[in-house]
Amino acid sequence: MAKILLGDIPISPGPRQRLKFNNPRSIAKIDIPGGPPIYQDMGEDETTLAWDGVLAGDDAYQTAIKIESLKDEGKTIPLVVPDFPELSKQVRIRSFPWDVIRSDRVEYSIELVAEIPPPAVITQLPTPAPQPGTAVPAAAGQSVIIKQGDTLWALAQKYYGNGVRWREIAQANGVTNPRKLQIGQTINIPG
């Protein structure tokens, strides 16, 4: 594997020539009163790259000091991985523990966190036309008779287009235990 550039510092990914790459996704669990949980994909979580290596040569100690300074500054720096360009990113150094063996030999581990680009800011959202086959929220401000399988979450989703608003329905109807709706009970959907 070719040398990696961390900023302007050429370094080798160690004797094993192995990069540890981690790019997880964040998943949120939403508990629904009276219903099964829903899992929401929240997108990419932080991407990390890590490896163990050896700095060797007359400037090994000075190179370790320079990398330590970059870590302490906390600024983003470019990482260039010539053999795997898709791993080349703007990164910050999370950790850089190192051992001085001699002035010309430093063993180290490094963990980098890739900078996530900020999302594009939309100043005005267009009002989308309903797509064929998609549900349009029903009109709020009416009464509903509870039937088998109804939940406050499902009612909020149906009438407001957002299940998280189930508490508004519960509060307006004096529901103290949302898991125990009675079949045949009349629920008012606030407008």
Image (cartoon, grey):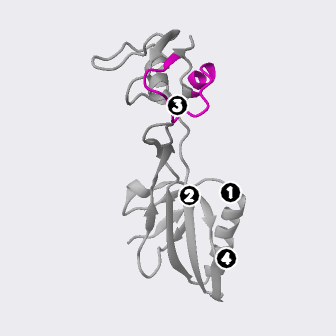
Residue 183 belongs to the span the image colors magenta? yes
Q: Nearer the viewer, mark 1 or mark 4?
A: 1
Tag 1: amino acid: Gly
* Disc with the residue nearer the chain's start (4 vs 3): 4
Q: CA distance from mark 3 to mark 1?
A: 24 Å
Locate residue 1, reporting x and y percent: 38, 72
Residue located at (56% from left, 38% from top): 118
Question: Which residue is label 1 attached to?
Answer: 74
Q: Residues within 10 Å of mark 3 (few under 14, many from 20)?
A: few
Locate residue 16, reporting x and y percent: 41, 80
Q: CA distance from mark 2 to mark 1?
A: 11 Å
* Disc with the residue nearer the chain's start (2 vs 1): 1
* Disc with the residue nearer the chain's start (2 vs 4): 4
Tag 3: amino acid: Ala
State which region is magenta: 167-187
Toward the viewer: 140 or 94?
Answer: 140
Locate residue 87, reporting x and y percent: 43, 57
Tag 2: amino acid: Val
Q: Which of the numbered marks, if any, corresponds to residue 175?
A: none
Toward the viewer: 31 or 121?
Answer: 31
**SS at badge 3:** loop
**SS at badge 2:** strand
